[in-house]
């Protein structure tokens, strides 16, 4: 299940669900009173991306690639319609999503992603079918998280159109002129939520990974009068949802030592009450270990931000073994949210380093672009420098350092093992890329152009893509390798795992393989997660 969105007027909700991790989500209607479920889309070969209810809860919008697998169109459907009843209101030619209905229910915000760092925003008039482009630009510019203004005459969003970091701006839909509402300074404004009736606003800043929430009221189109800061735990917060009167909002919070829970905040006072008690599976919360935010120097003088955790036990005489856990994306960011796998590793005696190497988001678009195409291997050098930093740490055993990562982080693991084989005691590759050429050839049609914008194109950069593919340097791997994958992965096809396992075994590398037939890009089912991560700890116990 990928999302749930309650109707604004009825005791029902729409939720999305795929099959076996294939990411081809279908939409379903859940009746809260009867528990009955109605399948709304019934197009199992297509993806459906939710676009929200209208104000009466009579209709909803979504984007889908049911007409052409490579592109997304916009649809509107009545709550009591199913399947082919959905009305095609706009034929797209790219990666489209719907960001919400106007207050008068006559228009939709349509968002288009050309790459992770290049977007456009449109409004679609449902009566005429006219699509109006509000963000013409040159180069790469992000226009993210668009929200209708209370009057329906403007759109609020975060953008880096004139800056290195994202800030909160407003587009006047009549003139397409921009106005800056809130500047995040050296940090990104992550997103904004606006309540139409009360004009209350919540926006967030990502400060070195930690969330800072600002709450206020739109007393003028470009002016927010701030209320007291919400009394929430330190960490990461998001998913703001206003109550019916706009006087309070729900928000999900998580941190290194507390798993995700919902708090409800009084908008004007900042007082917060925790509404949920998510299970910690019987593990005392006071045994969870807090991350330390660190920065280490890299080869070109930059400082690489990272989170470092050590077990709360006496270190072995030689020092702790350590897992260098590299995030995917690559335009993602490791943040101080709760990570059960990190706590599991700590509990088993491993220190954990989580670097945000160049290419990570959260530190401005210049930093995010430092690993693009021909600079790909500079990010692997950042991992090497992180290991050098660990070697100088008195609590770490320099001979027992492990590379672990998922998705693009899996590529980083394989590249680290082939580029710097002397550094590693073992590698753990989870749903990772082994060969950029076969990855791009076999990934979902709807994803290829976005990924080529980051990695390079098959047409123009094939030779370079082959040169940085770990599969072509497999003879350099010297450490034992554990490869885990989902059979139904639509992003990084399972063939990436099969080929790296086969080639590494031919080189005499000790290799373990674990493929889950009912998973996709990662492991969602509890039993599978237990098997996967217990297997990783057993593998490390044997080899590290």
Image (cartoon, grey):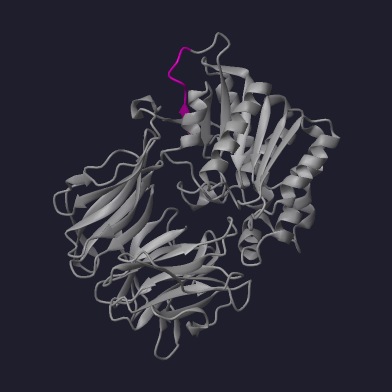
Q: Eyeballing the image, is 363 above or below 174?
A: above
Q: Residue furthest top?
A: 317
Q: Residue at x 58, y 32 (%)?
A: 534
Q: Residue furthest right?
A: 506
Q: Residue at x 60, y 39 (%)?
A: 405
Asked if residue 317 lies left or right of residue 479, the reply is left
Residue 376, horizontal then vertical, whole percent: 66, 46
Residue 478, horizontal then vertical, whole percent: 77, 28
Residue 311 is inside the magenta segment: yes
Give whichever of 169, 286 is nearer the camera: 286
Residue 112, horizontal then vertical, whole percent: 50, 70
Give whichever of 6, 295 is nearer the camera: 6
Magenta-tinted stretch: 307-314
Q: Is residue 198 visible?
A: yes
Assign the C terminus to one quadrant of the image: top right
**Which picture quadrant has residue 396?**
top right
Q: Main secondary structure of the magenta part?
A: loop
Q: Eyeballing the image, is 401 above or below 377?
A: above
Q: Residue at x 44, y 41 (%)?
A: 335
Residue 196 is inside the magenta segment: no
Residue 221, horizontal then vertical, whole percent: 23, 69
Asked if residue 436 lies left or right of residue 145, the reply is right
Q: Is residue 378 visible?
A: no
Q: Eyeballing the image, is 485 above or below 126?
A: above
Numbered-mark total: 0
């Amino acid at each position: 299940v990928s999302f749930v969105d309650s109707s604004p007027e009825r005791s029902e909700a729409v939720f999305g669900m795929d099959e076996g991790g294939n990411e081809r989500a279908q939409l379903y209607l859940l009746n809260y009173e009867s528990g009955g479920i109605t399948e709304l889309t019934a197009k199992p070969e297509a993806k459906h991306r939710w676009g929200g209810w209208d104000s009466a809860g009579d209709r909803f919008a979504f984007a889908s690639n049911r007409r052409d697998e490579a592109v997304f169109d916009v649809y509107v459907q009545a709550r009591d319609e199913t399947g082919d009843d959905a009305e095609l209101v706009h034929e797209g030619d790219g990666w489209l999503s719907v960001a919400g209905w106007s207050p008068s229910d006559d228009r939709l915000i349509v968002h288009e992603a050309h790459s992770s760092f290049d977007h456009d925003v449109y409004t679609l008039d449902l009566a005429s079918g006219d699509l109006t482009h509000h963000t013409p630009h040159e180069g790469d510019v992000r226009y993210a998280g668009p929200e209708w203004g209370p009057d329906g005459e403007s759109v609020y969003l975060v953008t880096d159109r004139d800056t290195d970091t994202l800030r909160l701006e407003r587009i006047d839909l009549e003139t397409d002129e921009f106005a800056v509402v809130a500047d995040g300074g050296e940090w990104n404004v992550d997103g904004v939520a606006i309540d139409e009736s009360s004009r209350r606003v919540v926006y967030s800043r990502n400060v070195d990974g930690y969330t800072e929430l600002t709450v206020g009221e739109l007393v003028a189109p470009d002016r927010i009068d701030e209320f007291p800061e919400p009394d929430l735990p330190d960490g990461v917060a998001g998913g703001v949802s206003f109550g019916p009167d706009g006087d309070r909002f729900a928000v999900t919070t998580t941190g290194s030592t507390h798993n995700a829970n919902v708090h409800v905040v009084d908008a004007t006072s900042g007082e917060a009450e925790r509404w949920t008690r998510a299970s910690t599976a019987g593990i005392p919360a006071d045994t969870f270990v807090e991350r330390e935010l660190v920065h280490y120097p890299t080869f070109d003088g930059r400082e690489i931000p990272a989170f470092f955790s050590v077990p709360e036990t006496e270190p072995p005489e030689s020092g702790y073994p350590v897992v260098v856990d590299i995030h995917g994306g690559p335009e993602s960011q490791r943040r101080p949210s709760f990570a059960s796998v990190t706590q599991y590793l700590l509990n088993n005696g491993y220190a954990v380093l989580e670097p945000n190497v160049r290419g990570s988001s959260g530190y401005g678009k210049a930093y995010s672009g430092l690993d693009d195409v021909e600079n790909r291997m500079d990010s692997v050098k950042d991992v090497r420098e992180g290991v050098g930093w660990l070697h100088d740490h008195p609590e770490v055993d320099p001979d027992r350092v492990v590379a672990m990562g998922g998705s693009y982080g899996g590529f980083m693991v394989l590249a680290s093992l082939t580029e710097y084989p002397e550094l590693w005691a073992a590698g753990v590759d989870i749903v990772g890329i082994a060969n950029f050429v076969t990855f791009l050839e076999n990934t979902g049609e709807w994803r290829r152009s976005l990924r080529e914008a980051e990695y390079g194109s098959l047409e123009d950069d094939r030779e370079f893509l082959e040169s940085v593919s770990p599969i072509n340097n497999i003879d350099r791997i010297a450490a034992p390798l554990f490869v885990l994958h989902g059979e139904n992965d639509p992003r990084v096809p399972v063939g990436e795992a099969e080929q790296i396992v086969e080639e590494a075994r031919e080189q005499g590398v000790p290799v373990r393989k674990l493929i889950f037939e009912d998973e996709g890009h990662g492991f969602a089912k509890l039993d599978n997660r237990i098997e996967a991560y217990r297997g990783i700890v057993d593998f490390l116990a044997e080899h590290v």
